[in-house]
Image (spheres, rainbow, N blue to C red):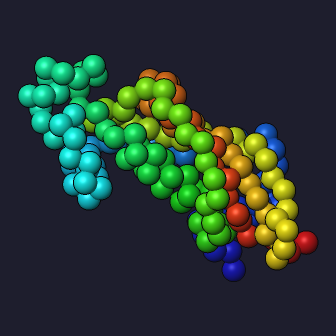
Amino acid sequence: MKLLGEGFRWNDLEVGQRFRTFGRTITDTDIVNFISCAGMLESLFVDAEYRASHSAIPGRPAPAALVYALAEGLTLNATAQGTGLAFLHMELNVSGPVLQGDTIHVEIEVMEVRPASKGGRGLVRTRNSVVNQRGETVITYTPLRLMEGREV
């Protein structure tokens, strides 16, 4: 019986394949919960008066770490649920702010697929672009993941 929502196996993927996740709106509650949990109690995130007089960004910004974490949730639920084994490496670039009320989605492109050294596992590197509702890429990151394989 097919397990619904199961992620890809490394040998199901090919370089050049592209995918898009559903969207996720960043709420005030998301920002407050994240900065409280992570201890990111920086004035930019907790002090509206400071933000009004010192911030280069109009509106309430979300920490890039929060945006990345939400992007990973959107990505993993769509691509690696039950098949991802380890997160090994990443490069991350932030190119624009995400504000309370923005909606993000992730556009994923498979960049590298190769077998691991043992166990029928494989390594998959993707380029994940976090895109807002205006079509602007705000974060790009390139995770390398160890993934289960499909028996051939």
Residue at point 79% right, 40% down?
Answer: 16
Residue at the left extreme?
49
Q: Residue furthest bottom?
A: 1
Would residue 6 be seen by someone viewing this image from the given angle?
no
Most foreground residue, 37 or 21: 37
User: Can I make out residue 91 in this image?
Assistant: yes
Residue 112 vertical position relative to residue 85 in the rendered view, above or below:
above
Task: Tell me if 1 is positioned left or right of 54 in this view.
Answer: right
Image x and y of residue 69, in percent = 44, 51
- 17 lies above or below 39: above
**2 sits to left or right of 31:** right
Q: Is residue 72 left or right of residue 87?
A: left
- Give me the residue at 26% from left, 59% from top: 37
In the rendered view, would you say 127 is above or below 152?
A: above
Q: Nearer the viewer, residue 143 or 103?
A: 143
Residue at screen point 73% across, 45% down: 110
Q: Is residue 72 above or below residue 109?
A: below
Classify the position of the C terminus by image quarter: bottom right
How far across and how far down the image is residue 104, in percent? 44, 38
**Picture quarter containing residue 64?**
top left
Residue at the extreme right: 152
Within the image, what quadrant is residue 56 found in?
A: top left
Residue 105 horizontal/vertical position (percent): 49, 40
User: In this figure, what is the number of numbered marks?
Assistant: 0
Image quadrant containing the N terminus: bottom right
